[in-house]
Amino acid sequence: MTSSAFAQDNLSIEIDISLQRLYLVDNSTIISSYPISSSKYGEGSKQNSFKTPLGSHMIKEMIGDQVPKNTIFISRINTQREAKIIHDQENSDNDYVTTRIMWLDGLEDGKNKGKGVDSYNRYIYIHGTHEEGLIGQKASHGCIRMFNSDVIELFSVVKKGTKVYIRA
């Protein structure tokens, strides 16, 4: 897929927690579908809950352009280390953020924006994971996890300001 195949300004992302899927949408038409992992703690916006927030968001920051696949980020900083990818359904002791980061900002006051519920201040991302064997089931600590190859593809076609809607 190339970004010239569609108008970037019309792109949005829809995430369906019940199906553990992320859809790239161009003017109401689904153009790509990816398996994801949302929070193993369920859905919610409360600070320190480790839950995946629902509702309208946008991509506020994009981090990791051109870094090698499987690169580990800690606090959004490239560690220059490569994660060992786990393909089995195994929950490791680490919750590595890998490859690319699309940092979400909530757009709904009191729901996912503002004191105690703010998605941006909670560091809610769409990102790659080293626990690829858990993709397709609830396994994260609040973020939306993707296969590393999928997050590279998605990152290459969206931009800051792209709307993201998360539903249960």
Image (cartoon, rainbow, N blue to C red):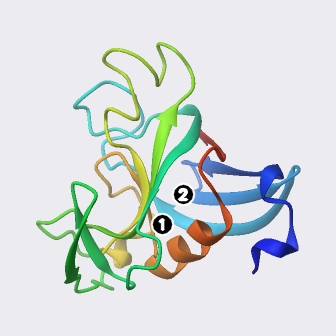
Q: What residue type is labelled 1?
A: Gly
Residue behind mark 1: 136
Crowd class of label 2 (few under 14; some 14 to 19; many from 20; radius 10 Å)? some
Task: Tell whether label 2 touches label 1 (CB within 8 Å).
Answer: yes
Identify the residue at image location x=30%, y=18%. 116
Residue behind mark 2: 20
Question: Left or right: 141 with respect to 137?
Answer: left
Question: Left or right: 33 with respect to 58?
Answer: right
| Viewer-nearest residue: 157 or 21 | 157
Rendered-image quadrant of the N terminus: bottom right
Question: Left or right: 80 with respect to 143?
Answer: left
Identify the residue at image location x=38%, y=44%. 124
State which quadrant residue 68 falls in. bottom left
Q: Vertical placement of 63 versus 3: above or below?
A: above
Callout 1: SS: loop
Could you tell which of marks 1 and 2 lies nearer the N-terminus? Answer: 2
